[in-house]
Image (spheres, grey):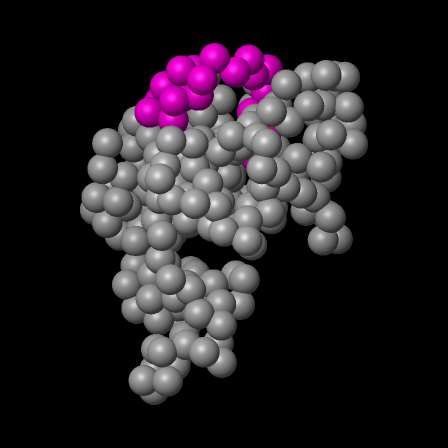
Amino acid sequence: MDVKAIYMKADALLEGHFKLSSGNHSQYYLQSAKVLEDPKTAKQLAEALAVQINASALQIDTVCAPALGGLIAGFALATALDKRSIFAERVNGEMQIRRGFEIKKGERVLVCEDIITTGGSALEAARAIEALGGEVIAFAALANRGFCKRDGSSLERKENCSLPVNKPLFALADFDFEMYAPDNCPLCQAGSEAIKPGSRGN
Ligand code: ZN
């Protein structure tokens, strides 16, 4: 499956000069919501991801997505795996399990994002699950930005990956784009200004 082609076709892989939510700059920006606005594509991607996860023989009870970014991918993956679908959300900056979702002691949870960058939100969701007695056994995303190590990929894990080393990350592709600190960005140095996608009132 050519995930990059799917992203490009959906205008979900933008080229320009972007300010990422981390504050870093990049020539590329991924807008997974644009891919997932087509439910058939969401289903197709989630089913491919489910094949990988099922092949690992890991037993999963529940898929938990960090809101907002992971919601659609998480729901689609839970559907493909035929597992329970819940989400974590940020309240006053802290990732929490709300909405009456219960986590049983020892419940085996997979945390699913749309894209894993350094995995910060996914890790926070994992901690919220573990605080309630659940056991986080794996992470998943449609694509991996190349900081964390995707199961089966030849790319190595980088220092700023926050996911636990001993738990697999399942993803369909590595989108290994360079990111730059604002004061060390060649695009800024060339005189252009970084824009924040989605911040123009749309
Ligand atoms: Zn820049």
- Name which residue lies at 44% across and 21% down: 53
Q: Is residue 145 left or right of residue 45?
A: right
Q: How many marks?
A: 0
Residue 178 at x, y = what percent?
Answer: 38, 62
Quarter of the picture containing the N terminus is top left
- Counting from the top left corner in percent of width and height, residue 95 is at 70, 44
Q: What residue span does the magenta drawing correspond to?
A: 47-65
Residue 73 belongs to the span the image colors magenta: no
Q: Is residue 48 above or below residue 2?
A: above
- Taking 32 as reference, is 60 left or right? right
Quarter assignment of residue 26: bottom left
Residue 156 shows up from this direction: yes
Residue 15 image point, x, y percent: 28, 63
- Asked whether residue 199 is in view, the answer is no
| Residue depicted at x 49% and y 28% | 75
Work out whether residue 80 or residue 160 is closer to the camera in this orientation and state it.
Answer: 160
Residue 30 spot, x, y in % from top left:
37, 53
Residue toward you, 138 or 38: 138
Residue toward you, 190 or 84: 190
Q: Quadrant of the C terminus?
A: bottom left
Q: Quadrant of residue 48?
A: top left
Res. 67 image quadrant: top right
- Name above or below for residue 149 compared with residue 167: below
Compared to residue 107, the image places residue 2 above or below, namely below
Residue at horizontal 22 percent and vertical 37 percent from the top: 2
Q: Residue at x 34, y 49 (%)?
A: 175
